[in-house]
Amino acid sequence: MAFAPVPRASVSDHVFGQLRDAIVSGRYRPEETLPGERELAAAFAVNRHAVREALRRLQQLGLVRVSQGGATRVLDWRVHAGLDLALSLARSADVLPVDTLVRDMLEMRACVGIDAARLCAERGDPEVTAELVRAADEYGTLAPDLDLMNEANIAIWWLIVRGSGNIAYLLAFNSLVAGTFAVGDVPPDARAAELLDVAGHRRLAAAIAAGQGTAAARHARALLTAPVTPTTPAARREARA
């Protein structure tokens, strides 16, 4: 297949990006062999070092495997890749070719958040819960500015996930919020039902502070499964209350 020559600045980034997209889009199928380094260098009009660096990054993402003898075989990203692939795509303003990806990532966010809220309440780190209650109290003062509320919402959930004591959840959360959920643009306006529920955020913080794991999970579920739709001016005014 034909590749476009790339600019001299960050040439390995361009080689990596084009090969990544060719693999993820299915132009290269699993178990198919990529062209050799010399052939790729000629196609991209770059040196072999840039190609080698790009292949190394593809291997780190779980997109290729260097076989015995030096052949580079394509892997099935659905089997071998992790959240780093979505984050890599988000940084280049692209997304995985999956129609339901935003929905899927928001569902994962809800699963992590609900259980993290329960654990945060049950494990009861006093420093985290005190900071969480303060953050929830201040949250309502930001309404109806959805952009500011979105930033504060992320800060609140980071405290909850940190307070859960689960490092795997924390790493997953960091990936989910990087690059706008790491899947493309989910504007705050589309999450207005969640963001404008000031009382819900306060109930969640209160349940965690009281050590009520079941109640914390219930309040977290109500927030994180709220409909993803644009808001109205009336709803923004009501959030002040």
Image: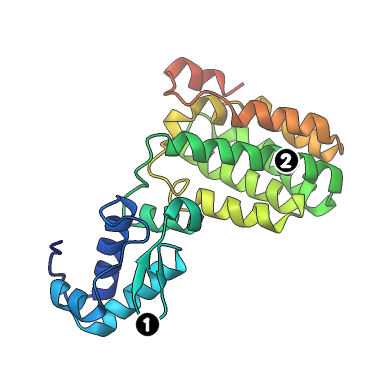
| 120 and 94: which is toward the camera | 94
Number of other residues with Cα within 10 Å of mark 1, as a class: few under 14, some 14 to 19, many 20 or more: few
Label 1 to label 2: alpha-carbon separation:
46 Å
Number of other residues with Cα within 10 Å of mark 2, as a class: few under 14, some 14 to 19, many 20 or more: many
Q: Are marks 1 and 2 in contact (CB under 8 Å)?
A: no
User: SS of the residue at dot 1?
Assistant: loop
Q: In which quarter of the image is the C terminus?
A: top right
| 191 and 147: which is toward the camera | 191
Q: Where is residue 175 in the image (x, y as percent from the top left)?
A: 53, 54
Q: Position of residue 237 (x, y in %)?
A: 51, 19
**Residue highlighted by disc 2:** 115
Residue 217 in the figure: left or right of residue 71: right
**Residue highlighted by disc 1:** 69
Specify whether residue 10 is in view.
no
Q: Residue at x 51, y 49 (%)?
A: 177
Q: Where 225 sits versus 161, above or below?
A: above
Amino acid type indicated by mark 2: Asp
| 59 and 84: which is toward the camera | 59
Q: Residue at x 78, y 45 (%)?
A: 120
User: SS of the residue at dot 2?
Assistant: helix
Q: Position of residue 211 (x, y in %)?
A: 87, 39
Q: Position of residue 199 (x, y in %)?
A: 67, 25
